[in-house]
Image (cartoon, helix red, strand yellow):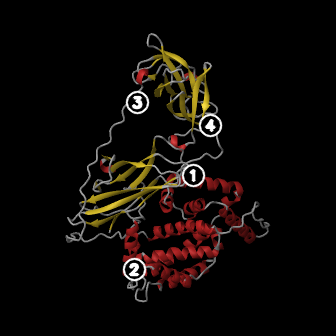
Amino acid sequence: MTGGAARATIERVGRVLSGMSVSSAAPLPAEFDAFVRARTAALLRAAYFLTGDQHLAEDLVQSALARTHRSWSRLHASGAADAYTRKTMYHLQVSWWRRRRVAETLTDELPARAAADSDVADETALQVTLRSLLLRLPPRQRAVLVLRFFDDLTEEQTARTLGVTVGTVKSQSAKALAKLRLLAPELREFYASAADEVKPVDLRERAVASSRRLGAGRTAAMSALAAAVLAVVAAVATLGGGGDRSVPPANPTPSASLPVAPSPTRLPAPTADGSPDVGPFAGATLTLPAWTGPRASACASGRITLNQGGISEKAALPVWVMEQLESDVDGDGTRELVAAFMCSEGPESPGTQVVAFRRDGANRLATVGRVVATGPTIAMIHHIEAAPSGVVVELSREFSDGGQSSVPFQRRTFRLEGGAFKQVAGPTTWPARPEHAALALNTTDVVLRPAADGRQTGQLTVTVANTGTLGVAKLVLAMSLQPWLRPAGPGWDGCTYEDFGADGVSVICPLDGPQAGATVRADYTFVVDAVHTPLPSPSDELESPPFSARIFQRPPYTYEEPVRWEQSFLIVVG
């Protein structure tokens, strides 16, 4: 698209949308006209990279601008129009892709490159190559690349726009770039010229039709834009997805029709984590089998004495008891002592070994043997459990410092047979594609509404959907809040409250985990004596949002490939 054609397109779209309205009595504000003129060209180019199709790009921009138009008063007042339009466009693109699964012709070979005798031919070939390569990427990877390297958004801004975590943005970006570098390394030299493939377009008829379709479900009496905006706010607030962020009158008049605000719920402080129970291993002297692998000589073995915390610092690296239990390891009716010992920690750790002991006549610990240890095929040992005859060990072949749920693991049972421990139950190989849970956290905004006593009350709804093949037993929901937003009413059983001063408040609540294919929901009510303004808006670029929610698993763990484990939300004055 040439510079003149681009300007002409912007002018045509601006003229069209400046005449759009819910009815002839509702002219569009001049600010929206200026916004459309400034953003249409960039949105069209981004949409083209997302869809790979001129007509789909036009539809995408038209639909996003129509939605922005309908909520313009709210978005312009909060400065959120640009972020809202981009977010709407990217979410619509993913939604359309899921519904349509647009037929994209993908071949095993990249399009033939033009000969190098023409700059125009080279540029055109690169454009075709880029489009073909982008269409080979999944929608989310495609969206991440466009946002990060075309719209120049930061990782945090991209995560906020797509409603995912920064970690997801990093991983999706890395995967997408790796694939592009493999397929077409010459794309490093190509960027700005590809946008010129987008053709000018007049969105008049379709934009007007979209705006009218969006308004068809509203009340027939709404003939002015202000009334339409109020309808949008009411509809979104009902769904818990947002609302008008304007501040209500400072002194609302009490009314008998207003609801009574629930009383604040006093939550206990979290209890401090105590030292692990090492049982009979506290201060014990025992014989530990030799360690294997790199740096094994730096770990204590042979005859060692543990301190009262179950730790030996005899060698260069500390050795300690991770877990201990009693279990009948050989089926003779007598329970032996079993402990998991770890040397140092992290990826440089020489490893972990599970060892069984018996008490001798002098009540000393006599080594029975090593149950299992990390090595070439086992990278981590996470947990041990007693079995009717033997011991269950949860282990994985990959190392991860993200917790047990972040890496595929298996439960294998070992038993003492013929003087040696052997695996008697559980899988013996690792599948190429392990079953897993796939959790997606979603939160509504907290829409505050006046209560009869002059306070305000609102509700946060949290849902966790599991689209994976394994269920999750238990979760922890961690909410980051501000102290003036106080928990109230029922629904806070088992929750704790910790005030970190200037860093805000942390509320931790237990949450049932969803089974495979299911969704769990929890509602939390808050009460506010006085709203603290200004409140954050969707366009605010905050490194640490003041209101957010995160989920973590509690034992027993399930291997998880998370979809979204963290999400920020807004406090909206309704």
The front one of 469 and 507 is 469
Where is mark 1, residue-wise?
Answer: 171
Near-viewer residue (377 or 523): 523
Quote the CA–CA distance across marks 2 and 4: 60 Å
Q: Secondary structure at mark 2?
A: helix
Q: Is 219 on the left-hand or right-hand side of 144?
A: left
Q: Does the residue at mark 2 contact the one at mark 3 (Cβ under 8 Å)?
A: no
Between disc 2 and disc 4, the foreground one is: 4
Secondary element type, mark 1:
helix
Q: Amino acid at mark 1?
A: Ser
Looking at the rendered structure, which numbered label has been put on residue 276?
Answer: 3
Closer to the camera in the image, 211 or 501: 211
Task: State the image quarter where residue 147 is shown.
Answer: bottom right
* Residue labelled with disc 2: 228
Q: Earlier in the sequence, mark 2 or mark 4?
A: 2
Mark before the other along the chain sequence, 3 or 4? 3
Q: Amino acid at mark 2?
A: Ala
Q: Quadrant of the N terminus?
A: bottom right
Gap in angstroms between the C-alphas marked 1 and 3 = 35 Å
Percent coordinates x, y for residue 114 in the rendering: 78, 67
- Which quarter shows the C terminus? bottom left
Q: Position of residue 228 (x, y in %)?
A: 39, 79
Q: Element under label 3?
A: loop
- Disc 4 target residue: 427
Secondary-structure class at tag 4: loop
Residue 62 image-quadrant placement: bottom right
Name the residue type under label 3: Pro
Spatial CA span between label 1 and label 4: 30 Å
Estimate the spatial distance between the alpha carbons at disc 2 and disc 3, rounded to whole Å: 60 Å
